[in-house]
Image (spheres, rainbow, N blue to C red):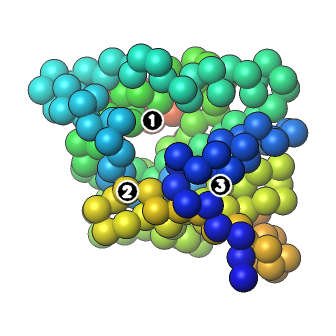
Amino acid sequence: MSQWINGSSDPAWLALFDAITKSAYRLEGQQVYSNDSEDAALEKFRATGRFEPLEPWPAIPIVRAAAAAGQTQTRVRVVVEPPTDYTRMELAAYPYLADAGEDIRIIAVPEGEWPADLPRYDYWLFDDRDVWRMHYNDDHTFHGAELIEDEAAIAQHLQWRDTALRQSVPLHDYLAVRQTE
């Protein structure tokens, strides 16, 4: 049986980020995520159209510490256009993470389509060897993560990462085009 982590509050989940030695990569494809800690920020974003970082926002020090340690953090976000309110909030939040040192890239696709040769689920890839497939409940809350241990499956996830990076554009390039539309 695969190793399983029960959601983001499981100490084992945070320990994965502490154990990174060189890189973390995430393919992020859900168009809506639900998290009690973000509900207020999403409602405020819907009302104002502006994102204000959560205080304290735990992601910022994690990204900064990784960058300071010489580690790379990369995320490829699939954006189905037109984007959901949640995705629009993420796009407004991403510059803060990019400024902290995360390489964020975007693949935009029209509604009803999906990027060629990429899975329709989220996953993390740590140090090019540990693949954690993300699982979400029907209400878009994070259910948990499953460690993929099969060597062929790990190789497939590495290939998907490379494919996603080739298909994506840097965050700031994507945002610049969106602002001119």
- Quadrant of residue 42 in the image? top left
Upstream in the sequence, badge 3 or badge 1?
3
Q: Residues within 10 Å of mark 2 (few under 14, many from 20)?
A: some
Where is 113 relative to 125, above or below?
A: below
What's the amino acid at mark 2?
A: Thr
Name the mark on residue 155: none
In x, y percent, where is residue 13? 64, 49
Q: Do the residues under discs 2 and 1 have CB atoms within 8 angstroms?
A: no
Observer-nearest of 75 and 115: 75
What's the amino acid at mark 1?
A: Tyr
Name the mark on residue 124: 3
- For the residues labelled 3 and 1, the Cα–Cα distance comes to 22 Å
Helix, strand or loop for disc 2: loop
In x, y percent, where is residue 126? 76, 51
Q: Is residue 88 visible?
A: no
Upstream in the sequence, badge 3 or badge 2?
3
- For the residues labelled 3 and 2, the Cα–Cα distance comes to 17 Å
Tag nearer the camera, 3 or 1: 3
Residue, disc 1:
174
Could you tell me which residue is drawn at 81 percent across and 42 percent down? 19
Could you tell me which residue is drawn at 73 percent across and 47 percent down? 16
Tag nearer the camera, 2 or 1: 2
Could you tell me which residue is drawn at 81 percent across and 32 percent down? 71
What's the amino acid at mark 3?
A: Trp
Q: Residues within 10 Å of mark 3 (few under 14, many from 20)?
A: many
Name the mark on residue 141: 2
Q: Does residue 171 appear to the left or right of 69 in the view shown?
A: left
- Quadrant of residue 6 in the image? bottom right
Q: Is residue 41 visible?
A: yes
